[in-house]
């Protein structure tokens, strides 16, 4: 059964502006020699090129159609060679520099969710003990880090490691693009290319389905939504009732989980929210089971309602906390500003800037979004000072199967020129966890912020088990409690971003920041103050041998400064 022919709705003024501006920037990145978009840091990006192919076909000149087919054939060449039992079956390379993952010495189908969990814990414990032994032998901290990296590289060199050797989410991102192309633009492609797209998608959909069912690598909400979409769409396209039935049941399960607390697992995550909204808009408009299209409409409205609770139009951000976050300021890594522009209109919302999510603008511009009328006012103008408390059920991607979620409480206080957010009850191990955050207006009218993070000394914020945050906020006040249950040194730090920051603004008991004074009670701890790319870091070291440091408490009182007129 083939999909019925549908067409996209004509683009409105805001959609056309966003589409044209994005395409102009992506045209400049196109490398004719290899048929992909160039990213100087990462070679040539496959996911961005896939989005670009959709844009080319939507623009629709003869030159665009020819270029789109070149791009699509280049993308098809980027799908890994794999067997159905491989954990990366149907995955595409992230860029043209990425090598084929190692050939595992055992079939991926026997690598269960439980074995993944316990192998992870075993590996982490070995590294912890190994690092401690090196320290006892007199190695420096830098030498220990180098040796541990070499050990990890050797230990994992023969098996494909998710996120390191491949990104399984590329199945769903590229699968959605191919679904849009085959639904709306198939007449622009030659028959052989369509057959190649279908063949690649057979591998992709089967790999995505195996991942969903075996649960070795749980799906975040955005990926789960796209998984449901591609199973539903290609199930209809290929006459596969098993895929359609699976998509409908998975959709029911996802909506049931959402309705428990009116929240997705990645609560307040602007990066994830924006992909959720794109996928839901696509579900409404593709030829899939009516039950899923109706569910998508309900969830799309629900997520906009969730955003309205925490969004501050004057500070142009959602308040914290963020269960997942690539950046604290959403304008640096999110499509939400573009979605607000499309949903509210140019009269109420300024044009968005362009960030690292540039390529995602194309699907957003073509598909649009629906913001419920009852929340538009809250998104367009600040609706008044408020205290917020909400619950949500988080997903711990590396948690024990059957015990990989916990109910968390997010608190926020929003005022005219500042807002605070804090999280308690989380067992999240992700390096993206941002369990406390603050935003405020600086004297020059810009927006400053800080966020609470943790990491190993000298490393980036990565996955770490057994660091627990229980934080609270009330008007002008934030209480933070951190519990450490691991045996290696760490750093807890506040990353402060904004204009006009200098180290001399930070004292042990007071941070005199432009636009905000923060009075700090850190139980007598004296921080280290460091410059960073974005501003400052106020660092509190954790030394695992110091038993007294295994619980850290902070009391922060905020004194906003009057905005200069």
Image: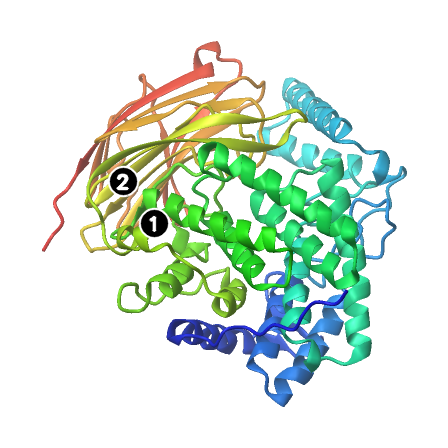
Q: Is residue 469 visible?
A: yes
In this view, 119 is above or below 500: above
Q: Nearer the viewer, residue 359 or 408?
A: 408
The residue to which callout 2 is attached is 419
**Marks 2 and 1, Cα distance to the nearest angstrom?**
10 Å
Does residue 308 appear to the left or right of 148 in the view shown? left
329 relative to 29 in the view: left or right: left
Q: Residue at x 38, y 62 (%)?
A: 343
In the rendered image, which quarter contains the C terminus?
A: bottom left
Q: Residue at 48% x, 49% y: name it.
A: 298
Q: Position of residue 445 (x, y in %)?
A: 21, 55
Question: In this view, which residue lies farthest toward the bottom?
Answer: 62
323 to the left or right of 386:
right
Identify the secondary structure beneath mark 1: strand
Most foreground residue, 363 or 167: 363
Q: Looking at this view, is 394 or 37 the one in front? A: 394
- Of labels 2 and 1, earlier in sequence is 1
Query: Which residue is under mark 1?
Result: 317
């Amino acid at each position: 059964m083939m999909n019925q022919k549908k067409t996209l709705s004509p683009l409105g003024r805001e959609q056309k502006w966003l589409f044209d501006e994005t395409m102009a920037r992506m045209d400049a990145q196109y490398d004719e020699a290899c048929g992909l978009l160039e990213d100087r840091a990462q070679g040539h990006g496959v996911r961005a090129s896939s989005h670009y192919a959709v844009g080319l076909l939507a623009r629709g000149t003869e030159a665009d159609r020819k270029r789109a087919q070149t791009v699509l054939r280049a993308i098809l060449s980027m799908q890994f060679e794999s067997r159905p039992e491989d954990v990366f079956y149907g995955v595409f390379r992230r860029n043209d520099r990425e090598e084929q993952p190692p050939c595992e010495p055992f079939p991926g189908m026997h690598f269960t969710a439980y074995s993944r969990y316990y192998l992870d814990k075993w590996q982490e414990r070995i590294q912890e003990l190994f690092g401690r032994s090196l320290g006892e032998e007199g190695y420096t901290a830098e030498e220990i880090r180098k040796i541990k990296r070499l050990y990890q590289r050797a230990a994992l060199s023969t098996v494909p490691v998710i996120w390191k050797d491949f990104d399984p989410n590329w199945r769903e991102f590229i699968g959605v693009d191919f679904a849009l192309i085959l639904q709306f633009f198939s007449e622009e492609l030659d028959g052989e290319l369509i057959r190649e797209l279908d063949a690649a998608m057979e591998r992709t959909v089967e790999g995505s389905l195996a991942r969903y069912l075996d649960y070795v690598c749980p799906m975040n909400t955005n990926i789960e939504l796209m998984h449901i979409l591609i199973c539903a769409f290609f199930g209809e396209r290929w006459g596969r009732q098993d895929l359609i039935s699976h998509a409908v049941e998975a959709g029911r399960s996802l909506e049931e989980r959402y309705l428990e607390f009116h929240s997705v697992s990645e609560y307040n995550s602007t990066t994830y929210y924006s992909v959720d909204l794109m996928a839901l808009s696509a579900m409404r408009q593709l030829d899939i089971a009516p039950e899923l299209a109706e569910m998508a409409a309900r969830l799309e409205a629900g997520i906009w309602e969730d955003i309205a609770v925490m969004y501050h139009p004057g500070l142009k951000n959602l308040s914290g906390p963020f269960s997942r976050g690539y950046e604290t300021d959403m304008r640096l890594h999110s499509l939400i500003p573009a979605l607000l522009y499309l949903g509210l209109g140019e009269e109420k919302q300024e044009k968005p800037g362009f960030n690292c999510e540039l390529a995602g603008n194309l699907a957003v511009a073509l598909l649009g979004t629906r913001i419920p009328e009852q929340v538009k006012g809250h998104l367009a103008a600040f609706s008044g000072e408020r205290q917020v408390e909400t619950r949500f059920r988080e997903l711990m991607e590396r948690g024990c199967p059957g015990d990989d979620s916990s109910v968390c409480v997010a608190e926020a206080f929003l005022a005219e020129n500042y807002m605070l957010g804090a999280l308690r009850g989380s067992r999240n191990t992700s390096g993206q966890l941002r369990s406390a955050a603050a935003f405020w207006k600086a004297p020059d009218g810009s927006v400053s912020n800080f966020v609470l993070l943790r990491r190993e000394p000298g490393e980036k914020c990565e996955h770490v088990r057994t660091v627990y945050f229980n934080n609270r906020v009330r008007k002008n006040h934030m209480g933070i409690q951190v519990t450490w249950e691991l045996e290696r040194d760490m750093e807890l730090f506040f990353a402060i971003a904004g204009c006009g920051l200098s180290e001399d603004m930070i004292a042990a008991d007071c941070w005199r920041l432009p636009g905000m004074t923060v009075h700090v009670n850190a139980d007598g701890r004296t921080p280290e103050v460091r410059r960073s790319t974005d501003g400052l870091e106020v660092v509190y070291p954790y030394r695992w041998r110091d038993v007294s440091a295994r619980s850290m408490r902070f009391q922060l009182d905020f004194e906003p400064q009057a905005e200069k007129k």
